[in-house]
């Protein structure tokens, strides 16, 4: 199998900091390159006011491509944070359990609807529920301990993608499943995730890891 090296351009580095100033300094100093893709894990920032305005404005002004993600537990915070991000962030990732919005709220932002779960979750049923909201991107992230179940789910997602022509992010999580993330990116996923310093999900590789693996698979 020859790896689709174009998918390297669709790997998003998942980042978070204590404050907006730390994020700004990381970019301004060159620690983070502005031409890479990023996932802003806003829920992991240590901010009291839950206001993403500075972060979103900085990313947009510097033309940095990113996914905006907020995994909150309070409905009021979820609505407040995402209501500001609407039509400002290029891609907005909302977990289906926190989807308190209308599809028409997303006019200029692309909607990534996500589901996070475990090995035994029913992928066909998950896709059916997600399809009701007509997202631009489907993200399914499951923590696998059974490789045969992963392969069955992979085939289901490949068939769904072929039928709907929708973008997919199939993320097999687990500390021992980093290679499954690579395999998913080669076969079906349009988007993958990498870690910066600390992982935001089990099994994440660094962008350099992906580059090294894809360079080997090219030959």
Image: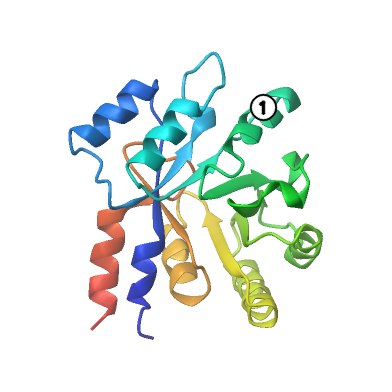
- Residue closer to the observer: 153 or 133: 133
Q: Quadrant of residue 211?
A: bottom left
Taking 102 as reference, is 40 left or right? left
Point out the residue furthest to the top here.
48
Residue 199 picture location, percent across and down: 41, 40
Taking 122 as reference, is 217 left or right? left
- Residue closer to the observer: 117 or 144: 117
Q: Residue at x 23, y 83 (%)?
A: 219
Quadrant of the drawing holding the N terminus: bottom left
Q: Residue at x 38, y 78 (%)?
A: 4
Taking 215 as reference, is 118 left or right? right
Q: Can you say whether 31 is above or below 212 in the image?
A: above
Taking 183 as reference, is 9 left or right? left
Residue 102 picture location, percent across and down: 78, 46
- Residue closer to the observer: 146 or 196: 196
Residue 190 picture location, percent across and down: 49, 67
The residue pinned by badge 1 equals 80
Q: Can you say whether 199 is above or below 209 in the image?
A: above
């Amino acid at each position: 199998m020859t790896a689709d090296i174009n998918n390297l351009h669709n790997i998003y580095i998942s980042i978070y900091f204590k404050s907006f100033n730390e994020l700004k300094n990381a970019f301004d100093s060159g620690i983070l390159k502005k031409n890479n893709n990023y996932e802003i894990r806003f829920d992991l920032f240590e901010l009291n006011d839950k206001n993403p305005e500075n972060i979103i404005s900085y990313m947009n002004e510097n033309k940095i491509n990113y996914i905006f993600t907020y995994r909150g537990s309070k409905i009021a915070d979820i609505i407040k944070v995402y209501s500001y991000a609407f039509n400002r962030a290029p891609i907005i990732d909302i977990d289906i359990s926190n989807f308190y919005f209308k599809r028409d709220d997303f006019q200029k932002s692309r909607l990534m609807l996500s589901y996070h779960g475990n090995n035994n979750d029913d992928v066909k049923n998950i896709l059916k529920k997600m399809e009701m909201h007509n997202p631009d991107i489907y993200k399914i992230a499951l923590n696998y301990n059974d490789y045969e179940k992963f392969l069955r789910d992979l085939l289901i997602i490949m068939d769904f993608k072929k039928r709907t022509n929708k973008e997919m992010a199939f993320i097999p999580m687990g500390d021992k499943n980093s290679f499954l993330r690579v395999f998913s990116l080669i076969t079906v996923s349009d988007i993958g995730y990498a870690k910066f310093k600390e992982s935001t999900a089990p099994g994440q590789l660094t962008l350099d890891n992906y580059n090294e693996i894809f360079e080997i698979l090219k030959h």
